[in-house]
Amino acid sequence: MTHNAPPSPSSAFERISRNVSDIVTEESLRKYLEASQESGRPLRVKFGIDPTFTHVHIGHAVPIRLLRTFQELGHLPVLIIGDGTARLGDPTGRNEQRPPLSLEEVQHNSTTYLDQIGKVLDLSPEVCEVRRNSEWFEEMDFFDCLRLASCGTVARLLERDDFKKRMAERLPVHLHEMHYPIMQGWDSVQVRADVEIGGNDQLFNLHMGRLLQEREGHRPQVCLTTPLLLGTDGQKMSKTYGNHVPLLSEPNDMFGKVMSVTDDQMPDWFRLLTSLEEEEISKILQGHPREAKGRLADEIVTWLHNSAVAKSAAQAFDSQFRKKQVPDDIPECALESNLPLANLLKEAGLVSSTSDARRTIKQGGVKVNGEPAVDPSALIPLGDEPTMIQVGKRRFANIRERS
RNA sequence: GGGGAGAUUCCGGAGUGGCCAAACGGGACGGACUGUAAAUCCGUUGGCUCCGCCUUCGGAGGUUCGAAUCCUCCUCUCCCCA
């Protein structure tokens, strides 16, 4: 990464604030940027990650991109790995209970997490600081905790939407969860954060950092939140809905996923995930939606892989879906000859059970060597020449006889 | 410590002795349509040697010709009071 002559504080402000949903406060952000330039001291920009799960998707990448922007402007990202907070579970999450994580799990999750984040952010020690919050939480005794807890009020916490909602639904809200924002805020005190970045559901937690810093006589951090990126179907992006794009997906997969984004998500995806200028974006969006989406997919695959790979992913996508051709890289396997079709599909791993196979066949979803197959119990002869089986639009296999 | 409520097929959630492999919704899958989608429509959604058979309704027993539904014990969860 190159650090050329630093841009002026005001142009830095423009760049930073382009895609954020809250800034607390604009004025202090401007001031901090100016002061930083005068003193030559980079701003410490904090971002917390929870090592409770390991799959990072491009929705998570939105705040990290902002972190990257700061990094490019010469400031210092400070990543906090919440190995202390992880033991609480995440109160902003769903209502399911998270079992307490073991030390190894946390360890493992943090490294895979960092691997993935490394796609978006330069993690070299010279330009990025990585801390774990167990570092300071482990040292606190019960009275320290009480002192911290006195910073918040129950009323204030109860205002939080997710608590309110869960109370209304008669779901449990555990006492320790109330400490989550306080712990997060304490991180800010510990690392002397000048700025904290989070998703826009994190605003409350970020505010807590300001509060605690002021109590400690520190300069309060600027809170920046980024808009929520919705999933390919327009719902909240989440692994459980299957509408997410993992940061580490294979190029072809990634391209295909982006192509399945609904049209009305496109503007957001362009703004939040590419570095194209607003003018350019609106020009693209005026063209044919399919072209625009192709461009979006190309930008994203280029970003997370490279441009050559993006081009070939585009071609593969085109031939498989637009021209309905068969993909090049069909998985192969070898099986016994003369199995009933339904059993063959199951053995080849194309369906989950023979019953499933029968259903799919009955519905006209199976082709053998390009010909629609209708009889689930037809015996399929195999030979050295592979027999191509297609299930639905996406599942293919080349099967030859096992010798 | 006391008092309630509950555990159903991927998820949510009906069902309170036979008509239950289990309503309905979501998701998923297949088909049609299409711009690759989305939306819409149709169909499927426990397993199998599949027009029949087998195993499911927290776990273990029991009552009955017959239980997801009734009884006993156990495990777990939630709420309220203290």
Image (spheres, rainbow, N blue to C red):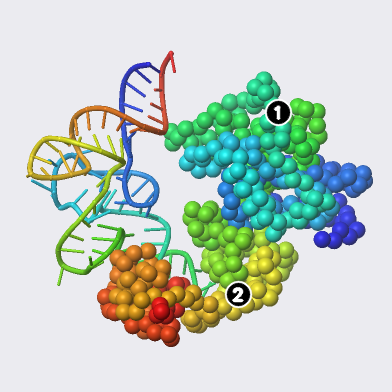
Q: Would you identify the image quadrant in which residue A18 lies?
A: bottom right
Q: Nearer the viewer, residue B27 or A145?
A: A145
Tell me the element at label 2: helix
Left or right, A375 with reference to A26: left
Residue located 61% across and 48% down the image:
A109
Q: Chain of mark 2?
A: A
Task: Please tell me whether mark 2 or mark 1 is closer to you in this view.
Answer: 1
Tell me the element at label 1: loop
- Compared to residue A112, the image places residue A87 above or below, namely above
Q: Would you identify the image quadrant in which residue A231 lies?
A: bottom right
Q: Nearer the viewer, residue A242 or A295?
A: A242
Residue marked by disc 1:
A139
Give the amino acid type for the residue marked by disc 1 in the picture. Answer: Glu
Q: Chain of mark 1?
A: A
Residue A32 point in image, percent of width and height: 84, 43
Residue marked by disc 2:
A313
